[in-house]
Image (spheres, rainbow, N blue to C red):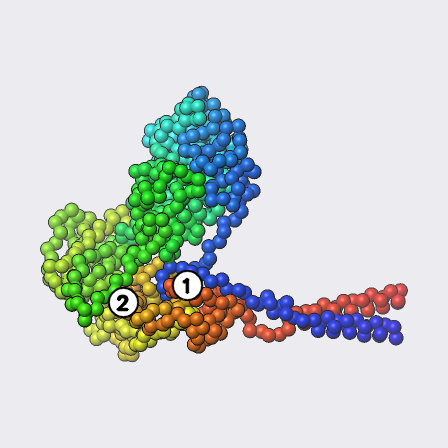
Amino acid sequence: MRRKQLFALMMAGALSVGMAPTASFAAENEVAAASEETGGEFDASETADETPSDETPADTTDETPADEIPADTDEPAADPTETPADETPADTDEPAADPTETPAEPTETPEEEPAAAQSEGEGTIAIGETAYTSLKEAFANAPDSTADQNPVYIKIAGTIEIDETIDVPANKNIMVVAAAENTIIKRADGFKANIFTVSGGTLQIAGGTVTDTDGTAIATGTLTVDGAGEDVEGSLIEVNSGVFGLSDGVTLTNNETSADGGAIRNMADGEVYLMGGTITGNTAASGAGVYSEGTVYLKGTVKVSENMVKDSFNVASNVLLAESGVIKVNGVVSDSSVGVSVKTPKADVKVVELLDGVEDVKLADVLPQFTYEGDEKFKLSETGTLISAAEPTEKPDPTEKPEPTEKPTKAKVTGVEMKWTGHNKVRIKFRSNIKGIYSVDWVKRGAKAPEITISGTAIDADTVTTVTVEDLPEYDVDIYVTVISEKDNNNYHSCKFQPIASDRPPASNTPTPTVTPTSAPHNVAKVEDSTIQGFEKALVFYPNTFYEFSAKGAGTDNTNPVEGDVRWVPVYWSMSSNPDSGDRHTVWKIGAQKGIYTEKEKTYPIYVFFQKQVYSGSEWVSQDGVIESKQFSFKAAPLTNVSGTPVPGGSDGTDGTGGDANGTSVDDSYLTPTTYAGEANGTARSAVSTGDESPIGTMMALAAASILAGGYVLVRRRKKEM
């Protein structure tokens, strides 16, 4: 009887536990959505297009000596070459020392010539009097030293080939010094990865005349880091964490990579010091000169120019700032030339600023040495931030004075892309700023440009046009694209493409068969015949209200196609005529997170991009790389910012009160509409729910209590039987 009573008592306890509130479980399903402002005006109702919030870089105090500047200041932990005499803690706001200033007590004795170094290729490598057969071996044998200690000098001369990545860990502080003119570090044949990777340590590369604090010359020379190679996948220098410094007399060049960061790839926990040197002739997916998610410090004379986006035509990408990337001037800058752009441009983004504590340097003297190469809708302001490139101009009232005569737009053709698609075929993409006709012709490289004829194919303004030039000869050619205005035959412009011979695919031994259509195509649609629905009337852009719209591609209503028919299928839309991947939206809704408050109706352009498809006789086949856009427009209706203005609907993911359905509110006091961040539109930042309302917490508690009760009864029974 006691056993039964005990079991009943345990079950009652389990039931009482099971009746506990389950609010704690339910609370886990509520995720507060953080409001974020990004560049542009309109929001895309598309989860994939959200830009993640900038995150504070991870704390690296474990890699920073205790006597360095605290991490909560704007100053860097240490200039890569600055080591106070006798290792005295830094306690001033003075900017860091030049890269050529080295401690009074160098690790190696500079006065003594090193012993004959072993060769790597035709080069010599030495630390003090010890010679090494490879640069990787020298790095591995360099004595440990941190950023607050003297660097270890590795002197090199001649040509050094690198066939595996050289890592700089947290216990290394190394300066590679050119000991002769025309010293070269080059990528070995077949080596595709990073040449150097900084993983918590300090790496400096220096040319010119390097001296210690006593003025004693350590070495003199020039150094080139050459990344030339095939199918390269890495950078010249990747800074995962730690410090990299570049000084006078050094050139980073010729790295053509499929990754971001042709010469330097700086991650959020890394610091890059550009105190001299040249970065040029590199190509990458983005940031061909420098790709930086962290801080780049700049002073001295620095050249970062003529670095291009890979597989594009004349698209500059010198210094690209991503995530929380910024350039901080930590000394006098003179005779420099730096191209800069921002991965996600928006108004008020900080691009260039003075480091706190830097004196006798004016930002106004520094900014003219920068060229903003990003989205043409923005430019650098006098404070180093991004601002709108042009403010809208009010039209004059025709009743007061006559409208001014429309000034014609001067024709301009811009190359977008050029790529070999066969041994005798080149695909080119270009854009015209005017509507008219275009023609394409080629001449032998260096010959006189072809004569301009008033005939060709129609082209719309601000539309990317793709043309494949076929039957090219074996010798080098110049391809000319000419656009003539539809309003004035004397208003024309030409753009020249020069295919690169080294990129030309080899000739095929098997001739390409010619496909003859079974019948003449009866429907070759043109992209300009595409239409859009949903913008027939002006839209009232309440905060967090999204409107559906749709695009109908030309030829998509062709229900009886024959071989050779053409149609255009809408694939994405953007507020930019040349969007990057983050501005390509595939959910066909549009809205403004904080609303558009305007006293009168406003018109905005929108671009829809269509994929060309050709009917093969049995199915529609997408044409590789042939995507063209058409510009449409929509109107924002007048809306006054009155406190308590009701927000209609709730179809956008809101509760109809101006707040997010997940419990977060939207500040409508900021009247400038924000851009592509649909926090209230069912995005990844909204409340997460599986749709299963079962009391999981209660069931788990009951199960646990029941198991405990059963175990207790079994133990008691066995003891009694014993």
What residue sits 29% from the left and 64% below the top? 627
Q: What percent of the width, then of the height, locates residue 713? A: 82, 69
Reply above or below: 11 against 505.
below
Give percent across and percent down for residue 116: 43, 23
> On the rendered structure, is 204 left or right of 10?
left
User: Nearest the camera: 626 or 31?
Assistant: 31
Element on which disc 1 rests: loop
Q: Residue furthest bottom?
A: 559
Q: Which residue is mark 2?
A: 631
Quarter-wise, where is residue 535 in the image?
Answer: bottom left
Q: Which residue, as the protein is rendered here, is positioned at the far front?
A: 400
Q: Is residue 357 left or right of residue 694?
A: left
Please provide percent x and percent y for residue 141: 51, 32
Residue depth check, mark 1 versus mark 2: number of the one nearer the observer: 1
Image coordinates of residue 612 in percent, x first then y, are 29, 67
Q: What amino acid type is highlighted by mark number 2?
A: Gln
The crowd level at tag 1 (other Cα within 10 Å; few <14, some 14-19, many 20+) is few
Which residue is disc 1 drawn over?
A: 670
Q: CA distance from mark 1 to mark 2?
A: 29 Å
Q: Residues within 10 Å of mark 2 (few under 14, many from 20)?
A: many
In terms of secondary structure, where does tag 2 sit? strand
Note whether residue 622 is visible: no
Residue type marked 1: Tyr
Along the polypeptide, which appears first: circle 1 or circle 2? 2
Q: Quadrant of the N terminus?
A: bottom right
